[in-house]
Image (cartoon, helix red, strand yellow):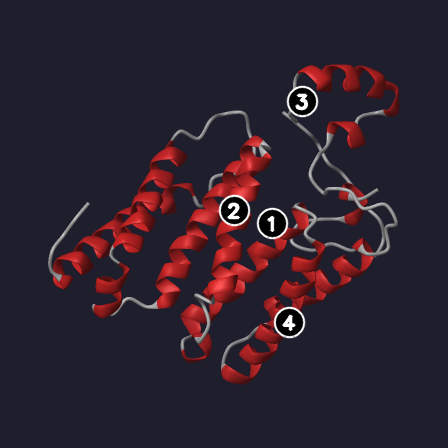
Amino acid sequence: METDGVGDVSKTFRALVEGADRKFARVRDVPAYGRGTNHYFHKVFKAYMRLWKFQQENRARLVESGLQRWEIGEIASRIGQLYFGQYMRTSESRFLLESYVFYEAILNRGYFHGSKKDLGVRFKELRFYARFLLVSLLLNRHEMVRLLVDRFKALVDDSKSSFREINLKEWKQVVQEIVRFTKADGSFSTPRPMRYCAKFDTHPDSLPYVARFHAKKVLKLQDAVLTSYQRNEVSALAFLPGLWLN
């Protein structure tokens, strides 16, 4: 897609953003479970990849027309969300890895830096850190988790002083849960992925059969019912150590 003037580029970009956002709104609240295939996901993903490619090819002219760095971060964050949502529906780790790539790019390039002056952008940055933490936990990226926890805590503290009129109680609770969770996670002597793994999570009596079958064809988790309850159980971002790490 090529356009000539700065005004034309900006107009095309805004149209692509609006179209992608409308599609995203249709899949944002789709349950992350069930056997049915979400065919609409591919349309949403295609719209955002088209938008992402367009802003890459026309970055200079878009910046000249007023494009903000956080807007680029928002597009990348949406793509990360789409990949993660697809991972939750399919259990295919390739989607989780793609989500990590986009979130890591947002972090390294500082797309949301400078959000102190804009409350809306600050909330986008807070949500980005929470989502990236979840993906990093699932991938067992311990060093990244520690970095994100420190930055997330600092961001919430800064938000308390920069936006005094806003109640940040829920974000404070998220930070407390993450700190407690990572502390509990660190107490396990045998690190293992938090994702379902047939070799780890299959019943011991089934391991010989699973090992033989897994050598020929990768097993995929189709359905699962997870239950857990203990007094004062540690949890964060919908994860419980009793479910995922025992």
Assign a secondary structure to mark 2. Answer: helix
Q: Earlier in the sequence, mark 2 or mark 4?
A: 2
Q: Is residue 216 above or below residue 43?
A: above
Assign a secondary structure to mark 1. Answer: helix
Are discs 2 and 1 less than 8 Å apart at CB? yes
CA–CA distance between discs 2 and 1? 7 Å
- Using residue 9 as the reference point, say whether residue 36 is left or right of it: right
Neighbours of disc 1 within 10 Å: few (<14), some (14-19), many (20+): many
CA–CA distance between discs 3 and 4? 38 Å
Amino acid type at mark 4: Lys
Amino acid type at mark 2: Ser
Question: Looking at the rendered structure, which numbered label has been put on residue 235?
Answer: none
Q: How many marks?
A: 4
- Percent x, y of residue 93: 59, 36
CA–CA distance between discs 4 and 1? 18 Å
- Percent x, y of residue 173: 66, 66
Amino acid type at mark 3: Leu
Residue picked out by circle 3:
219
Residue picked out by circle 1:
135
Residue picked out by circle 4:
153
Quarter of the image where one finds residue 160? bottom right
Residue picked out by circle 2:
99
Q: Earlier in the sequence, mark 4 or mark 1?
A: 1
CA–CA distance between discs 3 and 1? 22 Å
Amino acid type at mark 1: Val
Assign a secondary structure to mark 3. Answer: loop
